[in-house]
Amino acid sequence: MSEISLKKIYSGKVRDLYEIDDKRMLMVASDRLSAFDVILDDPIPGKGEILTQISNFWFQKLSHIMPNHFTGETVYDVLPESEAKLLEKRAVVAKKLEPVKVEAIVRGYLAGSGWKDYQQTGAVCGIKLPEGLQEAQQLPEVIFTPSTKAAVGDHDENISFEECEAVIGKELAAEVRAKAIQLYMEAAEYAKTRGIIICDTKFEFGLDENGTLTLMDEVLTPDSSRFWPADQYRVGSNPPSFDKQFVRDWLLQSGWNKQAPAPKVPEDVVEKTVAKYREALHLLAD
């Protein structure tokens, strides 16, 4: 993204941040794909634009639950027109916030690392669950399973709610849990009417200058969530995904050891992944 005249202040797994002033920044979603905390060499063309549109849709739809990082400005307010044109679908003007130091993960179904954990311990991240649950089964109630925020290249680690309280304080931990569950439940209910089951998702929060909890980064995208097509959902097996799980599944089958560098993802897997992202946008936001 060398065409941006602003100063780059951060480069993450997928997003790059540029300074506008001491209160605002430009957040740009790249086409990079990270899987198992490793950034793949091959970008997914158009992914950043699709993810930004999905996020923007949800930020707006859920804005009655809590404030978000939008300032109300567009890229045209902060960039020369030639740059703004190139970036209008993949960049947003965001408030500078102090990030809350945990990932807020909410699970409505038993899948992925949660399913593995349950098979071994009968619990997910220390939360005891009834016996006899099957893979992909809807949980008796939605659960909040926070994890630590890892630096780029490191793995996030699941932590208990008590550890979460120790990291960010009891009051904030309780607010993060309540808001994350409320956001998930409302989004999952809506998505179901559009033929998508949201199995689980990850929210990021920050605090503004007044200490107000604010939703930030990305929301309910196929990168931060596990989306399943409702018409292919069967308890007992993992449904095909709308998200980068498609690439993750291919990587797992390739025998890769999850250490950088990742193997080259075949062109057809890349194309199918882009198609899945587009389908999710179309189903949710059209």
Image (tube, rainbow, N blue to C red):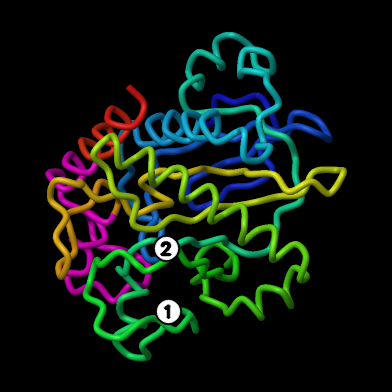
Q: Which residue is mark 1?
A: 124
Q: Earlier in the sequence, mark 1 or mark 2?
A: 2
Find the residue positioned furthest to the bottom.
121
Q: Is residue 56 left or right of residue 7?
A: left
Q: Is residue 265 above or below residue 171?
A: above
Q: Secondary structure at mark 2?
A: strand
Q: Which residue is mark 2?
A: 107
**Residue at position x 30%, y 42% in the image:** 192
**Residue at position x 43%, y 28% in the image:** 53
Amino acid bearing label 1: Val
Q: Is residue 46 above or below residue 155?
A: above
Q: Residue 155, percent across and down?
A: 49, 71
Judging depth in this view, the residue of 248 and 107 nearest the camera is: 107
**Residue at position x 68%, y 13% in the image:** 77
Q: Is 251 covered by the magenta stretch?
A: yes
Region of the chain picked out in magenta, as a range: 245-273
Q: Is residue 160 left or right of residue 39?
A: right
Q: Is 53 covered by the magenta stretch?
A: no
Q: Residue 84: which numbered mark, if any?
A: none
- Contact flag, marks 1 and 2 (Cβ < 8 Å): yes
CA gap, disc 1 to disc 2? 10 Å
Q: Secondary structure at mark 1?
A: strand
Amino acid bearing label 2: Arg
Q: Residue 280, percent across and down?
A: 29, 36
Q: Is residue 78 above or below residue 250?
A: above
